[in-house]
């Protein structure tokens, strides 16, 4: 990265302190609520990650609609974080809000399938292209369950993931690649099991390393995002997925694509848009318009193997499923989302606006003489502090600038723009407007000036 004179560590620290003061002065209600919430919530928030934003206290939310969010101090924000994808179709999309209100009066959960089940199954098949489905409440759970199925049907012990992956709070996947070895991710709390014994890691975009990991035919499943989105947005090289898919087939390894974030690519997700044929597919977060829900789909051939594995097992707990999964409220929201949000009509404006934003970001960094780059996957994009877009997690680690990113996030937040707290990621929704996009570009322009 070119060292811009205003971007030395000391200058960044000084600016960050000034932006923190600005937040404190303009957010008295959030500051007070942070204090009050600390009495009974660890770190003052319902989930400790909510403190991962760079602001001196959490921003407490009054309400959110479409691509706009309002905090308890009455400030409005153009939201490009969108709940880290949960609100990718906008906050409280009208068809989903309506379906939730209607179903809420008719029973929330019964541990029985609701009347909409058959229709939702057909919609999932039509939208994502796989014929068979099961439900979970979160993408973490869906991934956890598909790992069990994959190991059960293949009778193979190993899982393969890409370095820099994130598939939720799934113990088996929370590993890193260090000097060619799989190691437990050092940040994981309470880790006692050695997942490195059953999980292998390969660098992304490296077919030779992938083949080396698969060659002994011990890998049940390759679980992967079509593009890495959680260590930064890393796009697949042209031909990478065709090659990876062929290798999985050659060595009898199932291919499971986690489309939880890559749903941003286009209607139906990356695999649909690019003609990939995974045996398993996971979609969480935004799949039901923001209500907790995840689904995983699979081929007919795999469904048959799953049936046989279940029938062959003794009666009792399968280790797959949770009580509230597939509840009536979630099914109603999912039905509304599949019919009215997962459509070419809702993707068209969001993809067009995302293109305009990515182009504007590139123009802005070029105008300031910075050799930074932008990667884009449909409605999602990321600003990288490196001239070359990263090809794997190592590239991201080498070029990341955590202090600078924190400063940019807080600077933008103080000017009414929310970026995803992790990396410099922006997501455009169907409700985002050209004015929201202009606000980002004006903010970045002011930041760099
Ligand atoms: N898969 C992917 C690709 C994700 O990005 C995430 C969350 N960032 C998850 C799974 C887990 O989702 P959740 O936290 O909703 O379980």
Image (spheres, helix red, strand yellow):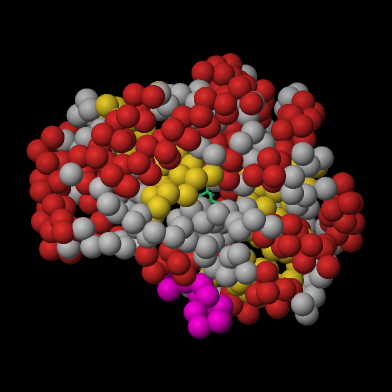
Q: Is residue 117 left or right of residue 224?
A: right
Q: Give the percent coordinates (x, y) of residue 388.
A: 44, 60
- The structure residue drawn at horizontal position 66% and vertical position 47%, both measured from the top left corner, is 282
Relative depth, front residue between 3 and 369: 369
Image vertical order of residue 207 relative to residue 25, above or below: below
Q: Give the percent coordinates (x, y) of residue 238.
A: 64, 56
- The structure residue drawn at horizontal position 74% and vertical position 29%, both measured from the top left corner, is 123
Query: What stretch of residues is rendered in magenta?
Result: 176-189
Instruction: State which quarter of the image contains the C terminus.
Output: top left
Instruction: State which quarter of the image contains the N terminus.
Output: bottom left
- The structure residue drawn at horizontal position 39% and vertical position 59%, both measured from the top left corner, is 387
User: In the image, is residue 185 part of the stretch drawn in magenta?
Assistant: yes
Badge count = 0
Q: Is residue 37 visible?
A: no
Q: Give the percent coordinates (x, y) of residue 415.
A: 22, 35
Q: Is residue 340 left or right of residue 412?
A: right
Q: Is residue 424 visible?
A: yes
- The structure residue drawn at horizontal position 40% and vertical position 23%, both measured from the top left corner, is 433
Question: Which quadrant would residue 64 be assigned to in this image?
Answer: top left
Q: Give the percent coordinates (x, y) of residue 343.
A: 64, 26
User: In the image, is residue 43 part of the stretch drawn in magenta?
Assistant: no
Question: Which quadrant would residue 197 be assigned to in this image?
Answer: bottom right
Relative depth, front residue between 186 and 238: 238
């Amino acid at each position: 990265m070119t060292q811009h004179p205003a971007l030395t560590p000391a200058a960044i620290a000084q600016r960050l302190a000034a932006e923190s003061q600005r937040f404190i002065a303009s957010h008295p209600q959030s500051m007070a609520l942070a204090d009050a919430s600390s009495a009974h919530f660890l770190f003052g928030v319902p989930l400790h990650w909510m403190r991962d934003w760079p602001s001196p206290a959490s921003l407490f939310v009054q309400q959110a609609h479409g691509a706009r969010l309002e905090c308890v101090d009455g400030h409005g924000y153009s939201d490009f974080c969108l709940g880290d994808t949960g609100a990718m179709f906008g906050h409280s999309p009208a068809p989903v809000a309506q379906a939730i209100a209607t179903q809420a009066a008719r029973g929330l959960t019964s541990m029985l399938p609701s009347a909409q089940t058959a229709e939702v199954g057909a919609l999932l098949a039509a939208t994502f292209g796989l014929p068979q489905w099961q439900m979970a409440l979160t993408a973490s759970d869906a991934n956890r369950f598909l790992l069990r199925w994959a190991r059960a049907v293949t009778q193979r012990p190993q899982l393969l993931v890409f370095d820099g992956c994130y598939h939720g709070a799934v113990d088996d996947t929370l590993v890193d690649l260090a000097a060619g070895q799989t190691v437990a991710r050092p940040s994981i709390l309470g880790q006692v099991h050695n997942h490195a014994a059953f999980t292998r890691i390969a660098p992304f975009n490296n077919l030779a390393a992938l083949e080396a990991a698969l060659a002994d035919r011990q890998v049940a499943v390759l679980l992967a995002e079509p593009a890495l989105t959680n260590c930064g947005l890393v796009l697949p090289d042209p031909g990478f997925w065709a090659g990876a898919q062929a290798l999985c087939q050659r060595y009898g390894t199932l291919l499971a694509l986690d489309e939880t974030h890559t749903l941003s690519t286009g209607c139906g997700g990356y695999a649909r848009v690019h003609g990939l044929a995974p045996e398993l597919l996971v979609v969480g977060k935004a799949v039901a318009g923001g209500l907790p829900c995840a689904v995983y789909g699979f081929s007919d051939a795999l469904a048959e193997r799953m049936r046989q594995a279940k029938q062959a097992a003794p009666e009792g707990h399968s280790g797959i499923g949770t009580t509230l999964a597939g509840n009536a409220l979630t099914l109603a929201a999912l039905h509304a989302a599949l019919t009215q949000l997962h459509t070419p009509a809702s993707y068209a404006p969001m993809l067009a606006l995302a293109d305009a934003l990515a182009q504007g970001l590139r123009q802005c960094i070029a105008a300031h003489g910075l050799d930074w780059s932008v990667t884009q996957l449909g409605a999602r994009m990321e600003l990288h502090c490196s001239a070359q877009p990263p090809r794997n997690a190592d590239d991201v680690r080498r070029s990341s600038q955590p202090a600078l990113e924190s400063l940019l996030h807080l600077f933008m937040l103080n000017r009414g723009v929310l970026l995803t707290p992790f990396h410099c990621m922006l997501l455009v929704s169907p409700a985002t407007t050209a004015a929201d996009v202009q606000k980002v570009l004006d903010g970045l322009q002011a930041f760099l000036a």
